[in-house]
Image: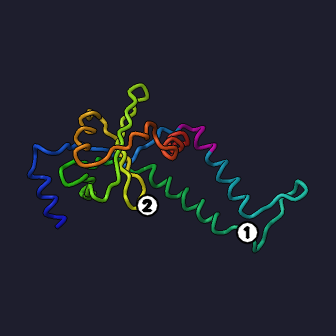
Amino acid sequence: MSNQIFKNMAQNNANYIKWQIPNYRKPERNRRWYILASIFIVIALFSCFFGITNWRPVFLGYTSNFLFALIIILASIIMIINENQPVNLLDCELGPEGFKLAGRLYEYNSLRNFSVVYKPRDGLKNLYFEFKSSTKQRLSVPLRSLDPLAVRNFLLRYLKEDLERTDVPLSEQLTKLLKL
């Protein structure tokens, strides 16, 4: 059934909006950021294996937090690997059956609502989808050069709009602030 929906979306050229987005946002990091990140990693790893007693480091032994140390090391490796990966463009498409992102269709009946956050002074133009399932995270899609009003009017035919979302979610603000 899903393949039939894809075919219908592609054939119905008058009823869709199509654009491309990068697969991830690559933040601009300077030397200072890398120095601070390295200091944070060293302090976090130190705290996994040592405690402070009477202003002296004490080895924690078998009570050391090995799992947290592993998570820190793996996250560091992943960030280093991703740093050297090129940014690819993904196809996005809004159609009568749903939202298609990189070949995956999100049908409107699986979505709770949408919101468009548009702040031209901040250079912000994003589309957000909330899923009915609480186990799925919010979907954030940059609108890039699209007209946000046209996207909003198109989606109002199929979904309820969340008028309470007027700002970028805190998680995205922190990610941008910390350049992650």
Residue 115 spot, x, y in % from top left: 36, 42
Q: Is residue 35 magenta?
A: yes
Residue 34 spot, x, y in % from top left: 58, 44
Left or right, 15 with respect to 34, comes to left
User: Which region is colored magenta?
Assistant: 30-36
The numbered mark, 2 or 1, whose residue comes first in the sequence reads: 1
Which image quadrant is residue 74 in?
A: bottom right
Marks 2 & 1, CB-CB < 8 Å contact: no
Residue 65 spot, x, y in % from top left: 69, 67
- Which residue does the image show at 11% across and 56% down from the upper left? 8
Q: Residue furthest right?
A: 54
- Which residue does the image show at 37% across and 56% down from the upper left? 131
Assess disc 1: are there few (<14), some (14-19) or many (≥20) residues with their C-alpha within 10 Å of its C-alpha: some
Left or right, 124 with respect to 21, comes to right
Q: Quadrant of the N terminus?
A: bottom left
- Is disc 2 placed on a helix, strand or loop? loop
Q: Circle 2 sits on which residue? A: 134
Front residue of this view, candidates 163 and 29: 163
Which image quadrant is residue 48 in?
A: bottom right
Q: CA distance from mark 2 to mark 1?
A: 35 Å
Q: Is residue 41 magenta?
A: no
Q: Circle 1 sits on which residue? A: 64
Residue 166 spot, x, y in % from top left: 43, 36
Tag 2: amino acid: Ser
Assess disc 2: are there few (<14), some (14-19) or many (≥20) residues with their C-alpha within 10 Å of its C-alpha: few
Front residue of this view, candidates 1 and 62: 1
Q: Residue furthest left?
A: 11
Front residue of this view, candidates 26 and 100: 100
